[in-house]
Amino acid sequence: MKILTLLLMALVFAGMAKAEDGHQLWLRQQPINKAKVTGPECIAAQELRTYSTQNVTLKIDATMEQDAYCIKVNSEQGKVNSVISAKNEIGLLYGAYALLRGETTGSEPFYKLRILNHWDNMNGTIERGYAGLSIFWKGKAGERKFHGRTIFVEDPDQPIDAELIKEYARANASIGINGTVLNNVNASPKMLSAIYINKVKQYADILRPYGIKVYLSVNFASPMSIPAKGFNGGKPIKTADPLNPKVKAWWKAKAKEIYAQIPDFGGFLVKANSEGQPGPFDYKRTHADGANMLADAVKPFGGIIMWRSFVYGAAHSGEDRVKQAVSEFKDLDGKFRDNVILQSKNGPLDFQPREPYAPIFDNIKNTKQMAELQITQEYLGQSRHLTYLAPMWREFFGFVAPEKLVGIAGVANIGLDKNWCGHHFSQANWYAFGRLAWNPNLTSEQIAEEWLGLTFNASNNEALKSMMLRSREACVDYMMPIGLHHIFAFDEHYGPEPDGYNAHVPLEWCPVYYHKANNDSIGFNRTHTGSNATAQYREPYCTLYDNINTCPERYLLWFHRVPWSYRLKSGRTVLEEMDYRYARGVKEVEDFIRIWNETKPNIDEQRWQEVDARLQHQLENAKEWQKVCMDYFSSFTKK
């Protein structure tokens, strides 16, 4: 495979010294237009005819598994001919992209559901988006400003950019992603109005030939503000109680309205009763009541409900936030319809640079589950830092067996920036998500090699790979080592604010809640003598994490409260270890800059300069984290 990949790279990247803006992502093959392709006339045939260096035969094999493909390569008389077999045209397309990146065998997806979650708002902005405005929803700048920021307002009459969406579809299909949620989980009821359903239909029509289904996030209280076609005289109703017959009828009518325009519509993603969102608790109902009502509405059409377990708030006043998902859902296990899937973040808190795995995956045994990963780096440098996330996700799969899940969702990092992701290396996280959703057993190293080979023509890709593989751990070091967590600046989640406290919000939104540093000690006691969060884990992790002598030091301050004089295995005290880790993180970024400087002769000027600028900014940020955090935490020991 490596020989074929190198040959492919030589052909693909010939003459690549010209400036590049990153818009082509990892699909940088230059048109060759020489391959003879026989078989069904489809997108796979078009791609191979344009970009392949060999002749290819495409075959439909109805006995194969959905989305699987088989590749057979024959070399005769100096000519290379390949045969791609699949159950349907989408399988052939996956096989075509695999052949173009140098694969020579075959594969089938581990997960049926491989979905991007876009947190895009209808006014064109993106919550936790770091690469510009939405590619789906077009707003317009309003005349007024708020805190110096331009206010964007919805503009549903703007036409869609069909060519851009086709490019988006092609990129996703090339890595096996087969679903997209088009809007923010903090959903507006307007998303289900007729004008927006028509927009969704237009997107579905463009994405469908690339094997991508569309899904929508929905606001649970939508029946109270949006009419459903053919129901209640075209008027909203006065309640969203999931057990109310009118509410059930409204959702069934709305589902019928959607599926009439989009027969292969995937279903709904729901954030309910968390961070102020409406939900079944508003009517003293359970998550199962709410999810099942929606599941019944889409079931006749083959739809699914992805119900997020990221819930915390007033219902659990005083309870350790990391325990609340298990508290709410454990007793409901087995009470959900078979087309309901619980969607849970990889960690129990909120996409921190490092968290232990979420114990909800241990406690839910009779309900389908999918993992939610965050591609967009909300807490990992926000596309301003080079942070390769495959090692983080592989760490998660070391604790949660892939077969326990029915799919994976990834919070997308895609916007209108020319390079799609803000940082050229952030593209690697989009790529890695798709590849792991197809095969969660791929290693971080394999994926990095693949992505680098397709994206850069550097002679020292081994050094770049090393930089990528070290980058997440470096980020943990210069932000929150040895189990520190959630000490970001309030709301923006970017810079350090370990002293953060705001009397106007719940304490669990403030950094001081998580480290609890005082003159004597630091850390959150989650053992049996504290919040007892360790009890939510299966063995051996329950006992392992509960005992300070066996708890991995990377989780030390997550699970344990320790005196400043406590010594780690290195022999250093807690503060000394912090000082060492923060300094190590800064040194790693300095080394990334050295490595990147060495690539300059082999990288096109535009991308080299843009990455270099981001790395310099990352170094400034790492030094800021080091100074702010060490000044703050060392102040306690001085006292």
Image (spheres, grey):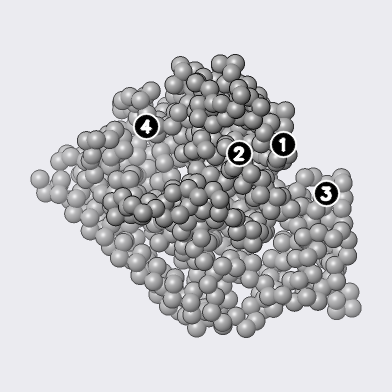
Residue 399 visible to an observer of this rendering: no
Of pointers 3 and 4, the one earlier in the residue sequence: 3
Q: Which dot, 3 or 2, sits closer to the camera?
A: 2
Three-letter amino acid code at disc 2? Ala
Q: Which dot, 1 or 3, sits closer to the camera?
A: 1
Residue 132 higher or lower than 253, as above or below: below
Q: Which dot, 1 or 4, sits closer to the camera?
A: 1
What is the secondary structure assignment of the residue under circle 4? helix
- Mark 2 lies on residue: 194
* Residues at circles 1 and 2 in contact by the CB criterion of under 8 Å: no
- 162 left or right of 364 in image: right
- 362 left or right of 348 in image: right
Circle number at residue 87: 3
Q: CA distance from mark 1 to mark 4?
A: 42 Å
Quarter of the image that includes the C terminus: top left
- Mark 1 lies on residue: 260
Three-letter amino acid code at disc 4? Arg
